Image (tube, rainbow, N blue to C red):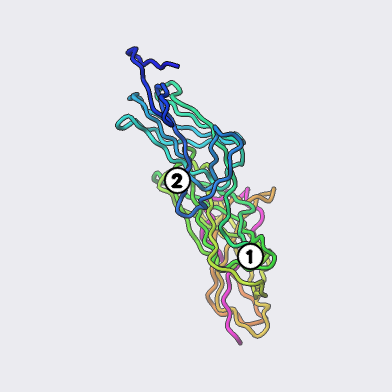
């Protein structure tokens, strides 16, 4: 088998001790991120390397071309991921693209275009993450997620309001100090914003409604949310005291009637012989189909004696949500109590 360059001379690379003629040499390997598991299961086909969710897919291309090159990854459900356009340096160009933890399992493809022509292409297989968490530890997963984005009235920025439902899959273990990292991902795969939060408790078999928001320096559309969850600690299922809520409603903005301004209602301390000294409120807004369209937060600071109630006002994070899309508020709470 012979390979010929544009000048008619053989162009040969050495692989595994054998001379292999090829104009372009492309290799694709998996790389482990610091927070990800290191074990990959065997790929269905030897020619299609396996990449676990949450690991990096690396595309390396050796080329003499001077044109701008771009990489495109396609997953089994038709969704795509783009690598930023690059020019080869010293005859090489490389992309490292994180396979999302929500990526569909199964076969995927990638290709690299330099200028108007396809320079190289290949296949890979997305596999589930190999867990390094002890079997008895609970797992917290995202049941549903959604967001709304709104350009700023002035300037070139925008705001994003999002909501997640975090579910503890264990029926016997409480998940504690749950660290949640939420990335805003643009259509080209680049991150345009990040929010982090630690939820003090997601009880065994329970779901926590996490709502929050972020101001972006760009109006580029957010294509999806990328969520990473880490468990701080866990304990055997216990009984946890939480307040109740009544007459919760969604209100328009005072100067923006078409957008959500706040969520208010009543908080009731039904715990006997305990004073609710404060509560962090996390709220997710749902559309008519029950899907999250945004979220926000609020707090109470005044002590609430046992058997009494008070008004709460949550005003942070909702202004990017169109009022006609937000129909149902779901409230979760992180309370603090004292005896008496």
Nearer to me, 197 or 75: 75
Residue stretch in magenta: 313-340
As drawn, which residue projects farthest toward the left? Answer: 90
Q: Position of residue 116 (x, y in %)?
A: 43, 21
Residue 286 shows in the view: yes
Residue 258 shows in the view: no
Q: Position of residue 160 (x, y in %)?
A: 50, 50
Nearer to me, 109 or 18: 18
* Secondary structure found at label 2: strand
**Residue at (58%, 70%) from the top-left corner?**
334
Mark 2 in CB contact with mark 1 (< 8 angstroms): no
Residue 333: quadrant of the picture: bottom right
As drawn, which residue projects farthest toward the top? Answer: 8
| 249 relative to 326, above or below | below
| 159 relative to 209, above or below | above
Which mark sits nearer the N-terminus, 2 or 1?
1
Q: Position of residue 123 (x, y in %)?
A: 54, 32
Q: Position of residue 1 (x, y in %)?
A: 45, 16
Graded by Cα atoms within 10 Å as few (under 14), some (14 to 19) or many (20 or more), the crowding at tag 1 reads few
Q: Which mark is residue 136?
A: 1
Q: Which residue is mark 2?
A: 191
Nearer to me, 237 or 252: 237
Quadrant containing the C terminus in the rendered view:
bottom right
CA distance for labels 2 and 1: 34 Å
Q: Is residue 180 left or right of residue 60?
A: right
């Amino acid at each position: 088998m012979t390979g010929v360059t544009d000048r008619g001379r053989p162009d040969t690379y050495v692989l595994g001790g054998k001379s292999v003629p090829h104009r372009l040499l492309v290799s694709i390997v998996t790389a482990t991120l610091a927070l990800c598991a290191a074990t990959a299961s065997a790929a269905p086909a030897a020619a299609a390397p396996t990449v676990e969710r949450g690991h990096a897919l690396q595309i390396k291309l050796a080329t003499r071309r001077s044109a701008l090159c771009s990489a495109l990854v396609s997953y089994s459900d038709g969704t795509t991921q783009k690598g930023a356009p690059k020019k080869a340096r010293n005859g090489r160009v490389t992309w490292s693209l994180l396979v999302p933890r929500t990526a569909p399992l199964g076969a995927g493809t990638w290709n690299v275009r330099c200028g108007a022509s396809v320079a190289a292409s290949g296949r890979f297989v997305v596999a589930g993450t190999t867990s390094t968490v002890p079997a008895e530890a609970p797992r917290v997963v995202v049941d549903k997620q959604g967001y709304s984005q709104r350009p700023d009235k002035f300037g070139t920025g925008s705001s994003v309001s999002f909501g997640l439902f975090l579910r503890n899959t264990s029926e016997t273990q409480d998940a504690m100090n749950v660290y949640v990292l939420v990335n805003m991902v643009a259509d080209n795969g680049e991150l345009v914003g990040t929010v982090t939060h630690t939820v003090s408790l997601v009880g065994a078999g329970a779901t926590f409604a996490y709502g929050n928001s972020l101001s972006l320096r760009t109006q580029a559309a957010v294509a999806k949310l990328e969520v990473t969850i880490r468990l701080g600690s866990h304990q055997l299922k216990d009984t946890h005291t939480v307040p109740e809520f009544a007459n919760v409603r969604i209100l328009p903005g005072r100067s923006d009637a078409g957008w959500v301004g706040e969520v208010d209602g009543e908080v009731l301390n039904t715990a006997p012989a305990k004073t609710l000294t404060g509560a962090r409120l996390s709220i997710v807004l749902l559309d008519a189909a029950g899907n999250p369209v945004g979220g926000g937060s609020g707090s109470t600071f005044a002590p609430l004696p046992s058997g009494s109630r008070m008004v709460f006002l949550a005003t942070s994070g909702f202004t990017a949500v169109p009022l006609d899309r937000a129909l149902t508020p779901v409230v979760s709470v992180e309370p603090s109590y004292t005896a008496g």
